[in-house]
Image (cartoon, rainbow, N blue to C red):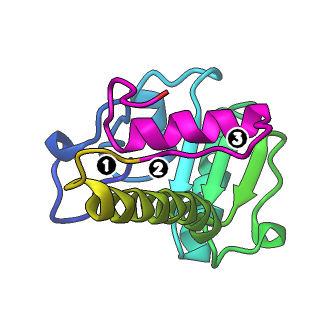
Amino acid sequence: MVPRGEESARSRTKGFTVLPGGLVAEAIVKLGATPDDEYAFVTEDPAFARAAVAIVSETLPQAPVLVLSDAVDPADLPPHPCLRTTGLRSLIRDDVDDEFSMLGNLRRVVAVRSLLERREKVGILLQPDPDPDGIAGGYALRAVLGRRRPTAR
């Protein structure tokens, strides 16, 4: 983690190490870095990404490097044997899309609960010859409604 001008070494995230003095080979050496350390750079600045990969390559040629950026072309980075690049927005978008999908499910659960919560009894009817999916759906609806015991046969 390379602190910005207004940040201090104390503002680092747990599990990350601040490079005092900025992104220079001497700072990596001062940390006592080993080839087992992993490096991740999140940037939209291609020049910074090139410099970061070059410095890690110079200091620890075998260390794994991950560059998260939507603006950096992997072809513009210096060669490094253990380098991976990926788009940051696509990673975030996929996770956020999953969360919105779950939020949509929650919205439907809330709507069903609000529709039926004032009812003392709710009939959950299955098809005449229920299959395992139908039975599971009935049990799921019962759980969603918070009903603990059956009130009908």
Residue 36 image label: none
Question: Against 81, is 62 above or below?
Answer: above
Q: Nearer the viewer, residue 91 or 5?
A: 91
Numbered disc in front, either 3 or 1: 3
Kindly state the secondary structure of the residue where label 1 is placed: loop
Q: Residues within 10 Å of mark 1 (few under 14, many from 20)?
A: few
Separation of marks 1 and 2 at Cα, in angstroms: 7 Å
Residue 100 placement (x, y as % from top left): 48, 65
Magenta range is 123-152
Kindly state the secondary structure of the residue where label 3 is placed: helix
Question: Against 99, is 121 above or below?
Answer: above
145 in the magenta segment: yes
**Can you identify the residue that label 1 sits on?**
21
**Can you identify the residue that label 2 sits on?**
24
Q: Are marks 1 and 2 in contact (CB under 8 Å)?
A: yes
Q: Residue at x 57, y 20 (%)?
A: 34
Residue type for callout 1: Gly
Q: Residue at x 36, y 35 (%)?
A: 17
Of the numbered discs 3 and 1, the one sitting upstream in the chain is: 1
Residue 72 placement (x, y as % from top left): 67, 74
Residue 60 placement (x, y as % from top left): 66, 32
Numbered disc in front, either 3 or 2: 3
In the rendered structure, the answer to whether residue 93 lies left or right of residue 26 reads right
Of the numbered discs 3 and 2, the one sitting upstream in the chain is: 2
Q: Are marks 3 and 2 in contact (CB under 8 Å)?
A: no
33 in the magenta segment: no
Separation of marks 3 and 1 at Cα, in angstroms: 64 Å
Residue type for callout 2: Val
Q: Residues within 10 Å of mark 2 (few under 14, many from 20)?
A: some
Residue type for callout 3: Gly
Q: Residue at x 31, y 64 (%)?
A: 115
**Can you identify the residue that label 3 sits on?**
134
